[in-house]
Image (tube, helix red, strand yellow):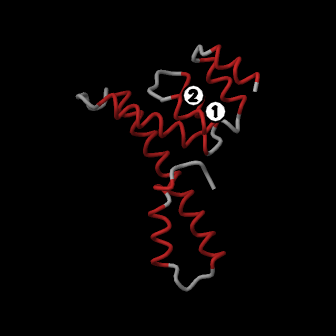
Amino acid sequence: MSTLPASLLTPVTDFINRHATNHGQEEKDELHAALYDSAKNMLTEFLSKTRTSRRNKGGARGLDSHKIDIVIDTTLAKLLADADLTNELMTLLSGPNDVVLSELEPFLARKKSVLLTVMRQLGQTDRVLQLLKE
């Protein structure tokens, strides 16, 4: 499936268990995958629009505003990486962002070239060399 937290699966699983009682396991699995993918796509679109709005309009400014930007950017980056949307991810990371790289790195582990590019762009030469040695 994906590397996203299991807590994102709970609403989908609950819905299927409540409403797909007359279906076989294979049908439930297909429905689960379709609903999960749809939910991830909607969340990606929502976070992208929210990010754009906050960046263009300055977003809500308060004590926790920067924390909100961190959550939005990091979650969006994880979703883009998980969906193999490399161009969109690189666009996000190439401009001003609040991504927590240590949280994103596991999502990029299967795409070493992207991880190396990201690390190089961020000036983390030591990490790039370490990854190349592995």
Amino acid marked by disc 1: Asn
| Mark 1 crowdedness (10 Å alpha carbons): few <14, some 14-19, many ≥20 | few
Q: Give the residue at the far left of this rendering.
A: 62
Residue 84 in percent (x, y) is at 65, 42
Q: Nearer the viewer, residue 107 or 37?
A: 107
Q: Which mark is residue 87?
A: 1
Q: Report which quarter residue 73 is drawn in.
A: top left
Residue 76 in percent (x, y) is at 49, 39
Residue at x 58%, y 69% (from the top left corner)? 31
Q: Residue 91 carries which label?
A: 2
Q: Are marks 1 and 2 in contact (CB under 8 Å)?
A: yes
Residue 95 in percent (x, y) is at 51, 21
Residue at x 39%, y 39% (from the top left corner)? 50
Query: Is label 2 in a helix, a strand or a loop?
Result: helix
| Mark 2 crowdedness (10 Å alpha carbons): few <14, some 14-19, many ≥20 | few
Q: Which of 84 and 119 is in front in this view?
A: 119
Residue at x 67%, y 36% (from the top left corner)? 109
Amino acid marked by disc 2: Thr
Residue 131 in percent (x, y) is at 71, 24
86 left or right of 54 in image: right
Q: Nearer the viewer, residue 35 or 5?
A: 5
